[in-house]
Structure formats: C-alpha cells, structure tokens
C-alpha cells in the first residue's frame, strides 16, 4: 500500500506540473487541486482507487499527446513564416540569433532590364514609275492616260510596258507645249513625281497635236491627210505644210479652219465620214478576202505595239485592221476603231454570239463614252488584236468578263 501511495504521489506531481504549465494555474491553485484529488482517492477502497488511477493515466496521456501535436504544429507554422530563411545564425558563423532580435528581411524581386528594340528605319516610298515595273499603281496611271487620250483603250494592267512609256512621253511633250502650265518636263517616258502630279491634276491637258511638235503620231496624221488627198510630203514635223493641209481638210468638212488638230478634227480625220479633197477622184470600194485577212493577221502575232502605227512590223489596234484589210484586197482607207465601227456599208452585228470568223469586233473605252478598241474575230471565242498593255499583237479570248462588259458591236467587212 505504501508503494501504491508513492506511485500515486509521483503521478499527481506530474499532473500538477503539466496542468501548471498548460493551464497556467497559480501554485496555490495547483496545491488545492492536488489536495482535493488525494482526499477523494483516500475515500475509495484500494480496488476502485486503482481503476481511477489507471483511467486518469489514460486521460493524461491523451492530453499530453494533444499538447505535443499542438506545439509541433506551432513550430511548423513559425518555420513557414520565415520564408525558408535559416536566419538562426548571426553574422558571426555559429552564433545563435534570438527570436526577439530576428527580423526577416524580404528578398527583393529584381525586374529584368528590358532590352531596347530598335525600330527599323522606314524605306522612303518612291512614286516613280518606269518601264519594266509591275506595281499596283501602274493601273490607275494607264487609266488616266487613256482618259486623256494619250494611250489607246485596252484592259489596264499593273505592268509598265513600252506602250505606257510612249503615252507618258506624249503627255510630257504636251506639258511642254501648254502655255498655261508653268512647267517643263523631260520627255523620257518616266512617270516621276512631277509628271504624276501634273497628270492627275484637275487641269491636266488632253492629247492634241500642235504646231512645232514632231514624232510618230505626227507622221501618222500626215499620212492620213495624204490618203485623203490634202498633203503630198510626209515630214514627221508639224510645220506650215501640215497647218495648210489641216485648214483645207477642216474647211471641206465643215470645221473651223484654224490649222489645229483638236479633238473634233482628229476624230473626223480618222472617220469614215471624212470627205476627201476635191482633187482626189473617189474610187469604188472593194471588199477584203476573209481567208487572206485571217492569214495575214496570224503572221503579225508578236509584232510590236506602237500607237498610230499601221505596219508592216508594228501596229496599234486599228493600224493592224487597216494593214490586214489592205493586204486582203480592201481599199478602205485608214480609220481608227471608232471610224471602222461606223462604216455603213459593212453589216453590223449587235450580239456577240452572232459574230463569225473574219468579223471586226469593237469595244467601248473604260468610261463607256466612245469606241476605243478593235480586233479581228478568229472563231466563236478568240480574236487577234494589237494590245497596248501586252505591248504586241496577241491572240486572246474576247468572251472574258472585261470584253463582254465593253462590247459595242461587230462589223462584217467581206
């Protein structure tokens, strides 16, 4: 029994110490607590006392386990708050640092220094257009040249070819002969900044030949006057003899005889309605042989396109028709596309589907204001024509959307 009391006393002391530490009881309260337990245990018989002591031991053990787990969790939380720092050592290696003196210093986050990106130096845009270029802005250039009469009407392209170059050169010449424009251009066929600005200006001059000009177009005009009986010598220069021939032509055809080849004079000069000179005897009209005309036309495929030319190795669209008709036996004089489309003694065809081999096919210009192009029909879908944008005589499909849209009529010259 004495040994049991000794063990009980030790156990009570442990409980007292644990309760003091965890419940933070005063020492007096601890003594009162232990004395109360002894009195209650003393009243019990030995067997019941043993049962109570064993149950109390189990309860105490559970309490101790809870306390230990709580302390362990608290230590883990404290360690987590240090962000992984091991600042338990002082600056001197091996010296411990007290919890009260330790203040964690956050590790600064360094932003990466951005590498400056150098903007590429922009390449200055050069508006200059010249032969050999393929650019989107060539198409509006061609349309403007066609609109002002410097280029024959055709389907526009993005390619700056020889016909476009020749048209630009004619415009540059026109500027140099226009007194109301204070500018002088080099007649090089290159559409530079100044040429383009003048070409697209609201007061840009239309094509017209004037006194003092020279070139292939002047030669073609003189040949037309000669064919009508108004001129005998071809010079390629618009001088006094050309002025005199134009005055005679204008006077006989009801125009004001000023010797200037303006738009009305030019259109009539290449029209079937133009009256020949009084001294030239009219000859009876002869028609072309269809097979011969087609054969001649095929031989010209690939020949160079030149505005106003009528062969034998360079042509514009109406010049090719004139050459093929003449080689096939027709004595019809040189007309332009609009002129050939108005020949009354040739059967007129109003539907594209009614065209036959050897017919002439005519198309409106891009503004649908006049007849601007002519070709020779090969079959139900193809024609041969001198194309300014292709730069040569070509064989192509006239049933494509562009040509269908611009179709005017056909004429049967046989």
Image (spheres, rainbow, N blue to C red):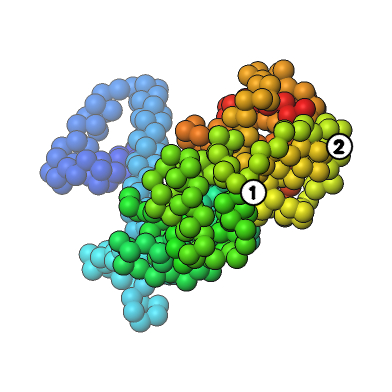
Please name the residue shown 39% across and 27% down the image: 55
User: Mark 2 against mark 1, which lies toward the viewer?
Assistant: 1
- Tell me which corner region of the image, top left, top right, bottom left or bottom right, holds residue 176: bottom left
- Tell me which corner region of the image, top left, top right, bottom left or bottom right, holds residue 81: bottom left
Residue in the foreground of this view, choosing between 364 and 337: 337
Mark 1 crowdedness (10 Å alpha carbons): few <14, some 14-19, many ≥20: some
Q: Which mark is residue 237?
A: none
N-terminal of the pair, mark 2 or mark 1, is 1
Give the CA separation, mark 2 to mark 1. Answer: 23 Å
Please name the residue shown 73% across and 22% down the image: 355
Residue identified by numbered label 1: 227
Q: Position of residue 14 (x, y in %)?
A: 32, 44
Residue identified by numbered label 2: 292
Inspect this view and state whether residue 22 appears. Answer: yes
Element type where label 1 sits in the image:
helix
- Residue 131, compared with residue 287, is above or below; it is below
Residue in the foreground of this view, choosing between 1 and 247: 247
Q: Position of residue 210 (x, y in %)?
A: 44, 59
- Residue 189, compared with residue 373, is above or below; it is below
Q: Position of residue 269 (x, y in %)?
A: 54, 44
Please name the residue shown 53% across and 69% down the image: 188
Residue in the foreground of this view, choosing between 366 and 413: 413
| Number of numbered discs overlaid on the protein picture | 2
Please name the residue shown 35% across and 82% down the image: 92
Mark 2 crowdedness (10 Å alpha carbons): few <14, some 14-19, many ≥20: some
Residue in the foreground of this view, choosing between 393 and 269: 269
Inspect this view and state whether residue 387 appears. Answer: no
Q: Quadrant of the C terminus?
A: top right
Q: Is residue 343 left or right of residue 3?
A: right
- Residue 318, compared with residue 123, is above or below; it is above
Q: Position of residue 351 (x, y in %)?
A: 65, 18
């Amino acid at each position: 029994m004495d040994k049991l009391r000794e063990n009980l006393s030790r156990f009570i002391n442990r409980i007292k110490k644990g309760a003091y530490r965890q419940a933070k009881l005063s020492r007096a309260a601890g003594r009162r607590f232990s004395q109360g337990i002894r009195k209650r245990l003393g009243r019990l018989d030995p067997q019941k006392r043993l049962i109570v002591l064993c149950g109390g031991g189990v309860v105490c053990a559970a309490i101790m386990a809870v306390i230990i787990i709580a302390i362990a969790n608290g230590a883990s939380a404290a360690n987590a708050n240090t962000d992984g720092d091991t600042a338990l050592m002082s600056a001197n290696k091996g010296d411990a640092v007290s919890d009260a003196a330790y203040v964690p210093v956050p590790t600064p986050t360094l932003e990466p220094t951005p590498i400056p990106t150098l903007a590429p130096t922009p390449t200055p845009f050069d508006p200059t257009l010249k032969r050999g270029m393929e650019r989107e802005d060539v198409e509006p250039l061609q349309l403007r040249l066609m609109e002002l009469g410097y280029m024959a009407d055709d389907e526009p392209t993005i390619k700056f070819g020889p016909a476009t170059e020749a048209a630009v050169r004619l415009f540059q010449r026109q500027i140099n002969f226009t007194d109301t424009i204070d500018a002088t251009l080099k007649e090089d066929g290159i559409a530079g900044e100044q040429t383009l600005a003048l070409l697209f200006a609201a007061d840009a001059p239309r094509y017209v030949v004037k006194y003092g000009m020279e070139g292939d177009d002047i030669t073609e005009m003189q040949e037309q006057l000669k064919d009508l009986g108004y001129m005998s010598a071809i010079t390629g220069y618009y001088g006094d003899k050309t002025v005199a021939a134009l005055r005679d032509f204008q006077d006989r055809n009801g125009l004001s005889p000023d010797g200037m080849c303006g738009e009305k004079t030019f259109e009539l000069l290449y029209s079937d309605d133009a009256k020949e000179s009084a001294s030239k005897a009219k000859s009876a009209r002869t028609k072309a042989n269809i097979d011969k005309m087609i054969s001649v036309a095929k031989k010209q495929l690939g020949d160079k396109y030149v505005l106003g030319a009528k062969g034998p190795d360079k042509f514009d669209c109406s010049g090719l028709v004139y050459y093929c008709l003449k080689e096939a036996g027709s004595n019809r004089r040189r007309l332009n596309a609009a002129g050939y489309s108005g020949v009354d003694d040739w059967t007129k065809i109003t539907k594209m589907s009614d065209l036959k081999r050897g017919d002439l096919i005519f198309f409106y210009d891009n503004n649908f204001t006049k007849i601007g192009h002519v070709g020779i029909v090969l079959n139900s879908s193809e024609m041969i024509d001198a194309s300014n944008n292709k730069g040569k005589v070509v064989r192509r499909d006239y049933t494509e959307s562009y040509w269908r849209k611009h179709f005017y009529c056909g004429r049967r010259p046989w």
